[in-house]
Image (cartoon, coloured by chain):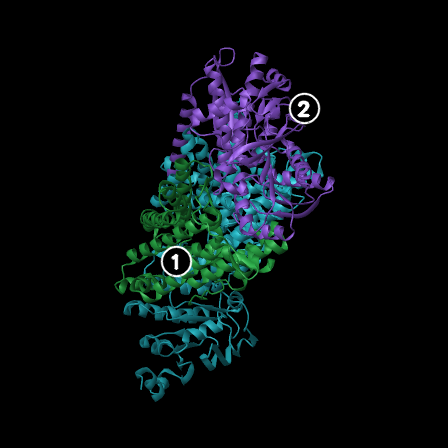
Amino acid sequence: MKNRKFFAIIIAVALTITMLAPAALADTIKIGGLAPLTGPVAQYGIAVQEGVDLYIELLNARGGINGSLVEMVWEDERGDVTEAVNAFNKLVEQDKVVAIIGSVTSGPSLAVGDQAVEIGIPIITASSTAFDVTYNKPNYFRTCFLDPFQASTMANFARDEFGAQKVAVIYDNSNDYSLGLAESFRAQAEANGQDVVAYEAGAGGNVDFKAQLTNIAAQEPEVLYVAFYYTEAALVVAQAAEVGLDVKFLGGDGISGIENVISDVALLENSFFYSDHFASDATTEAVVDFIADFTAKYGRAPTIVFSATAYDAALVLCEAIEAAGATDFDAVVEAMKNTNTEGVTGKLTFDENNNPTKSAFIMTFVDGNQTFVKQQDP
Amino acid sequence: MKKKVRSYIINIVALVLLYSLAMYLIGNGTIGRYYMGIILTAGISVVMAVSLNLTTGILGQLALGHAGFMAVGAYAAALFTIHIGTEPQAIFPISLLVGGLVAAVFGLVIGVPALRLKGDYLAIITLGFGEVIRILITNLEFTGGARTLRGIPRVTTFSYVFVMVVLVVAVMFTLGRSRHGRAILSIREDEVAAEASGIPTTYYKIFAFTLSAFFAGMAGGLFAHYVGVLDPKNFGFIRSIDYLVMVVLGGMGSITGAVGAAIVLTALPELLRGFSDYRMLVYSVMLILMMLFRPSGLLGTKEFSLTALIDWVLRRKPEAEIEAVEAEQVFATRHKPALLEARDLGIQFGGLKALDSFELTIEPGEIVGLIGPNGAGKTTVFNLLTNVYVPTFGSIELEGKSVVGLPTHEITQVGIARTFQNIRLFKNLSVLDNVKIAYHNQMQTTPVEGTFRLPRHWREERLANARARELLHVFGMGEMAAKDAKNLPYGQQRKLEIARALATNPKLLLLDEPAAGMNPTETQELMDTIRLIRDSFGVAILLIEHDMRLVMGICERLVVLDYGQIIATGTPDEVRSNPKVIGAYLGA
Amino acid sequence: MTFVNQIINGLHVGSIYALIALGYTMVYGIVKLINFAHGDIIMVGSYTAMVIMTELTGLPLWVGLLIAMLAAMLVCTTFGVVIERVAYKPLRNTQRIAALITAIGVSLLLQNIAQLIFSPNSLPFPVAIRVPPVAIGEMTISFITLLTITVSVLLMLGLQAFVHKTKIGKAMRAVSEDRDAAQLMGINVSTTISVTFAIGSALAAMGAVLYSTAYPIIIPTMGAMPGLKAFIAAVLGGIGVLPGAMLGGFLMGVAESLTNGYISSQWGDAVVFGILIVVLLVKPSGILGRRTSEKV
């Protein structure tokens, strides 16, 4: 009986909270944000949140979209597909958002994708690189590039820059981003006639890769493609030194930020090369402003590149709403398809699968700072 | 019977009302996709929690890998639907069944070796299996691995979840209150005593574990067809813990408690969305506080009953369950002459011979006493006779047939029942259930008959009730049938243990210090009871006792042990004057 | 040479597992609780050490590391003892599973507090030790590896001596044998349990500093994986037995390293859990565990 009373109280509280929620102001445009803000992948979710919030703040300071202010409603999904679906439903139904930015990792992005297609709401992710996320989903867009492009760029770079014949790969077999990068890199390397001498996995959540690196060292490759996010990559670089593996390291966009977490920045100097969405040391106005604004708002430079792609996702979405002059789903989706704008991460247009066609920037580190090496156009 | 019918009607009406109300609210849009999502998730959690409750709450085995079974079921069901390809709506029930069955096979394969372990070790090994399943799914090609399994038709609807929840909860209740459910409960209460009461404990552990895996697999199927995407990361250790928390918070063993906790704990993080950053912080603090202030969970081991609630609201006194006791002679059959013969029996622990060259013959209807100083090996004899220990050498024959090496529960079935030196009752079960459990082997209701309450279930339950009440009446405990065994006074507990042993319909009853801790009046009563057992039930009795008044008073023959050796046998008078016996007792 | 290197890699991880496993095993031995929050105590230790080392920039890193380790031990010990007093002690006489769930709650709580204070981002752990690898014949072994293995073995030996030679150590063993009997012998059970948690947490703090020195990135959820692995190591060696925790830790580390090196790096964790399952099935009480049978 106690149980029932308790339950009844909870329901009552829930209903009250729902009813007390303020009704949407006519002159406010609500956009939903879906990201893991707590839990194991929270750091990527928060990077996305910071990028989006920065854009929206600047936009509102400029007077919003045609005079309407934009309000972000963030929901946490903890990297879990069920929570992602619940949060998505809440945004759509309770908060009545007109568009959604999210989600961050592939599982949740895929899970809400089907639901989004059903109702046709415009949705854009800044970080889900899996092909299926936007494939066959007319209203799902992304501002990050796909795995094959950046991985094959790096395989070519290894050949052209270092004349590398023997290449090795280390990846996380429990992470689809990492798997995608590793497989694409291997495929391109083989197509280039390079010899993939080692292809080693390390499960997610692990911190010790010395066993794999010892194996890799025994094969004496010239380059090692590190298909990890920067946290694991920092450990790989440090442990490679420990096991006496002396190679050039290559990586994807997830490497950006490694200089902030590696305990010895010297290890990166001219030895780690990775593909990124923009050259953070570029002198273009967009990049300089982004970094300045970000630092002004958060007191530090952006650590994870998704802050930049997220900024661009918000930009694409808001410009589309402005261009459509309305917030009805089809008009905004149509406007997004026709996007042709300049973002922090370069010129943004979308192909038939709503993927951005944009350049990759190969970066390295000099004196502990990200340094532009080469631009690779698609 | 009438009471049961009324209760069925109340519950069915309530379910129909609830379903209609939900369908109405869905129809007019009050329950939109957000609430629907929470309701479906909660329903799936209920199935998971209730199925885990079978293993952890009812069987009493801590399992930390339940999400593994959910994962197996989810992938099996999803792959089935995807590969059949056509008509996902139509084949969905079959997909669910496939999910359940594949999970059950995993449950069986894991349960057979794992359930030999107990307590924390079982918990850890299930954790290990759960993780291995997750790693397998991550690394196999056909599951999609880390790339997730996509494109699962999203056909899970409210109706499916509702039916599934009702089905699982109903099965738990009906099966739980059949002879099979009692057998499972008895294992939680005391495995050794369950085995001694004739329950094949290994079989029932695996049965419960497999059934639990089956339902988890079905829940997995519902889940897969609800989210449409399966990611192995979502079936890790933490997910198993989530379900365990629901079971413990609801009250271990309480089915309705698990239902309530599953709903609350699924809804809670959603309700806490307003707290944004502090959401999981608040959740963890609430978890700690709930456990600190209510460690036995919301409902403890009790069940919420709608019928009882209605009775309470109407201030209606619950009808006493009066069942027509068929005028049937209880224990009408006298046994054929029973004869126990143990020859040259012995056991060695390391270098120590705890018992050596033990010889014993018991004639039908005889009362034999086994005495000797502490540590002489008396209880060892009992443990050898019931195969708790396997004899190193020697033979034991009951009615000319060897019983050496038979599992304890089979020894009970062939006719040797026992009590324990330190009483081992099923403490949290009623006195009546304690006795009814011992009738297990005299009933034939199958799990299916029990679950669907087919006629044989009712017939045998009536008979078991009648017999158990009759037996309790003989022991002067008829009034206490509904009490929990743990609430009985000490002397009554001893008697209940004897009654339970007798209910297995033994030919030979082994009593281990039945008078220990009794006052003289209770001992006197006990002597009368023992004589009554022999006289009216024709059971031969072998008893270990230190109370010489009792031993000398009722035993026809005595066997005296010292240091694992027989030092004397004979009538009480002969033994009393045997100098060796005097020496052993006086330490000379 | 690769083989020897793989063994050394394994011993390095293994010695850290062993150090953490000691805490699990001590707590389990005395209160029969699988302390799921133990892994998060490691996280607390790492963050404490990180904060101290970042603050103490003026001092030589060696000194900084020592002070950081002491501070981490102090903070972790306080956490351990307070958690036991507040969250576990009230449940000491109820069913054990209630305390287990509370431990899970504490674990979640610590992670979420850390996330609020330090953000969910990974942070670098300052490197304190910059010593070139030690060359032994043809082989080179990193200094951190040598240090970690040495410190764990020394701590293990010290702990073993403590438990067997000192009065409080004997009290700990007595309480783990039979709490009621120990109480009748005049042993203060609550104090003894507190001391056990204190020592376990202090060891976790040292484990944390060594762990973070070897894997210098810290994050609020960092305790989960080493916690789980160390727990399995404790069970493998025989939970409740100190040398068992050590053996289990080393065994796990080497098994993991050899699987990653020679069989398949995808299946490293599966092999670890597989070994656990096999060992439990063959000898349920673990490799060095005592077999306890129920008296009927």
The crowding category of the residue bearing disc 1, from other C-alpha atoms within 10 Å (few below 14, some 14 to 19, many at least 20), is: many
Colour in which chain A is drawn: purple
In the image, taking residue B508 as reference, residue B146 lies left or right, namely right
Q: Which chain carries label 2?
A: A
**Residue C99 can be seen, yes or no:** yes
| Chain ID for green | C
Q: Place residue A222 in its image quadrant.
A: top right
Q: Which chain carries label 1?
A: C
How many numbered callouts?
2
Q: Where's residue B246, x and y in %?
A: 45, 43
Q: Where's residue B416, x and y in %?
A: 49, 70
Q: Distance between the residues labelled 2 and 1?
A: 60 Å
Residue B295 is tagged as: none
The crowding category of the residue bearing disc 2, from other C-alpha atoms within 10 Å (few below 14, some 14 to 19, many at least 20), is: few
Q: Give the structural element (helix, strand or loop) at label 1.
A: helix
Question: Which three-letter amino acid code belongs to the residue tagged 2?
Answer: Asp
Question: Which three-letter amino acid code belongs to the residue tagged 1?
Answer: Met
User: Do badges 2 and 1 share one subunit?
Assistant: no
Q: Which of A209 and C25 is in front in this view?
A: A209
Q: Give the structural element (helix, strand or loop) at label 2.
A: loop
Q: Where's residue B495, x and y in %?
A: 37, 64
Q: Place residue A10 in its image quadrant.
A: top left
| Residue at image mark 2 | A351
In the image, taking residue B485 as reference, residue A362 lies left or right, namely right
Check the image and report above or below for B331 versus B305. Answer: below
Rendered-image quadrant of the C terminus of chain B = bottom left
Q: Where's residue C57, x and y in %?
A: 37, 41
Check the image and report above or below for B432 versus C121. Answer: below
In the image, taking residue C240 as reference, residue B213 lies left or right, namely right
| Chain ID for cyan | B
Residue C26 is tagged as: 1
